[in-house]
Amino acid sequence: MKKLLGILMAGAMMLSLAACGSAGSTSTAATGDTAEASTSASTDLKVGVILVGDETEGYSAAHINGIKEAAAEVGLPEDQIIWKYKIPESAECSDAAEDLVGQGCDLVIANSYGHQTYLVETAEKYPDTTFVSMTGDFAAISGLDNFKNAFTAVYQSRYVSGVVAGMKLQELVDNGTLTPETQPNSFDADGNVKIGYVGAFPYAEVISGYTAFYLGVKSVFPTVTMEVMYTNSWFDIDKEGAAAEALIANGAVIIGQHADSTGAPAATQRLKDAGTICYSVGYNIDMLETAPTAALTSATNVWKVYYQELFTAAMNGEEIPTDWAKGYEDGAVAITELGPECAEGTADKVAEVEAALKDGSLHVFDTATFTVDGQTVTSAPIDLSYYDYSSGEAVAVYQGETKEAIHDGYFDESTLRSAPYFMLHIDGIVEDSEPVA
Amino acid sequence: MAAQTTHMAEPLVRIARREAAPLSRKIAVRAAAILLALVVDALFIFFVTGLNPINVYVVMWGGTFSTTVRFSWAMRDLATLLCIGIALAPAFKMRFWNIGAEGQVLVGGLATALIMVYFGNSLPAPALFVAMVVGSLAAGALWGFVPAWFKSRWNTNETLFTLMMNYVATSIVACATNIMRGQASSLGTLNKATKAGWLPILFGQRYTINIIVVLALTFAMYAYLKYSKHGYEIAVVGESENTARYAGINVRRVMVRTMIISGAICGLTGFLIVAGKDQTISTTSAGGNGFTAIIVAWLAKFNTFYMALISFLLVFLERGASEIASAYSLNEYAADIITGIILFFILGSEFFINYRLIWRGHHKEVKGE
């Protein structure tokens, strides 16, 4: 018995030695291959990507697709992209970034806002590598030349998705489907129609988004009021569903959302099937599969536009913009396919609004279209500093200037920096003080 | 009855406890287990993912060994896991099922973080570090003391009690981080502007100090359990409380004292995580290490040096798995299956070290061996 085991062990050791030997040879062969590939390919740019999720999570999936499409477009071979999946917004992000630098990446991208404070640590250590924190907000004031931010002007597509919802409201009221008699709960004391919005967190990104959505609805159907309910999570299918149900129970006819799951559209479809008049406007992805008749459309980002610009600049050694924010003008935002129950003429109206946004004749946050406490807003100073609140008072980690966001009669979103900063609480929108239970 | 059964058909295989196996046998069994695991994994890799198993193993190996930075990260993670294992060893040796390491680490980390943030500007660096260490030790000790005291007074079930204390700790940390983040969307690194309370960089890394501290603790805990009077008392209480009482050992006192030590070292791990590794606190700061360390302590039979080996194996497997997932764009679950199979075989090999199988008709031969 002992002998047998002895032989087995000897065999094991020999095998492991053999494995080591072949290991060495394969790895040298591999490096030889890549060296060859990079000389024959048009570029030797190596890109590292840090993702908060993987292809099963909508937000990260959109980034993965955008990066792959952009890489194919500019001729960046797929084996020169290294992926790091499911990296939480913690010190693990610094490790992942450092590891990517160690693997020879010249460009490191992290896709979630919370990665930013950890990514910047690595950026300080490696000044020769460029780091991009998607949706981040302090690149310009960090004092680092190799640290960048980018975000699309998604508020524009939210506005357009609001227009789609407004068209639907107009149709429901015009053809007598939605009246104070058929669904009395959906009208407030002043006769305004109620709509609802499922928000993730009370941050500028969400406030800017829901305000744009509301203004889009209002541009078509002026007598409207909106209730916003928070879930305190970016992705929580149950809470988003519960929030949508609560909003519809309060009378909301349209449910918009800034949260990443299909919870709200699914709940809306369920209640619609049960006889309530209600529709859903989604985010990120087409919701028609989840809500075949309740989904009107979704507001989305077209990340490919940014990544293509980024890769091209990096490959040609050109300057990479510190704050990148583009919208309809460059095709960086869009709405998804219109649902079957959209009002007649919606497609034409959408095309008209999109054209106006593109040529700059229409501004989403036109100060003539909204009021705060009954007053037209003429000034909105934006403090661009990045604060640490942990000790109870705001300590500026990076000091930024305070700049005026309103000029020429509109609030200029996403130009002072790429991340949204519209934080006005306008009339007609009520935020629930408590998040959904 | 007994006589009758012996005349009936003998079972195909019987299991018998093995007397202490010689070292050579232990090594042989474990080596065979690892080899078998690699073979089974190779089949899985080849038939399910279609990749070349050897290449996958090379990538897995590279997860820890391909660069010096990766190796130093593995040492850092090992230090965290081992430190908790060291903390659990005395409690488990006493047969006190401390399932609450996760919570003890968290409160230790939270105490560190709070002191770091609120005294970061007022205290000079040496005093700040002393305060952080003392705070973390005290918080962890408190979290260990409460269930031990309840058990010593009213014989409450320590498994449930310590487990429950984890949830309490997690909720307190969640609440504190929510308050501390203020208007920001997440807490981020603490004292980012001043770096107050961040361990100094030694040999290029902040966590060098973590590794040194845990190394010292490894020796200290080994000596404490093996050579000190306390260690002996722990062993006696663990074997039999009645014997301990008969020998004049104050069981209650030993129990409470040991859990205070166990909790305090967990708390210190929290300090090392916050000051030396993450520079922040969150509900996931302990990262499940509080539970993984139970395996570490048990497999090593409370020998801290074996614990270091087992911690290394676990860290190596984990880093290897994430490297496989990244390199081949594999779903993380596939990588987890690969490491899971290895772990399964290693745990399974313990059975063959502690027990032997007696096949039908072979019992005489085995006896003669």
Image (tube, rainbow, N blue to C red):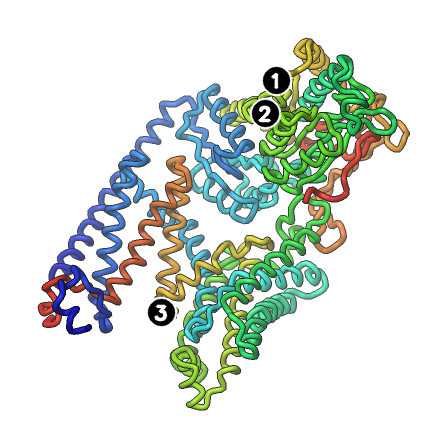
Vertical arrangement, residue A17 with respect to residue A53, above or below? below
Q: Secondary structure at mark 1?
A: loop
Circles 1 and 2, Cβ within 8 Å, touching? The answer is yes
Residue sitting nearer the eye, A200 or B56: A200
Instruction: Point out residue A9 in the picture as x, y percentages from the top left corner.
Output: 18, 57
Circles 3 and 2, Cβ within 8 Å, touching? The answer is no
Give the number of the disc on residue A339.
1
Instruction: Point out residue B334 in the picture as x, y percentages from the top left corner.
Output: 37, 41
**Residue at point 19% right, 73% down?**
B2
**Residue at point 56% right, 35% down?**
A111
Q: Residue furthest right?
A: A375
Q: CA distance from mark 3 to mark 2?
A: 56 Å
Question: Residue beneath label 3, please?
Answer: B301
Residue sitting nearer the eye, A44 or A347: A347
Give the number of the disc on residue A291.
2
Q: Chain of mark 3?
A: B
Circles 1 and 3, Cβ within 8 Å, touching? The answer is no
Q: Secondary structure at mark 2?
A: loop
Quarter where residue A334 is shown? top right
Q: CA distance from mark 1 to mark 3?
A: 63 Å
**Residue at point 65% right, 51% down?**
B192
- Quarter of the C terminus of chain B within the rendering: bottom left
In-image side of A55 versus A24 (left or right): right
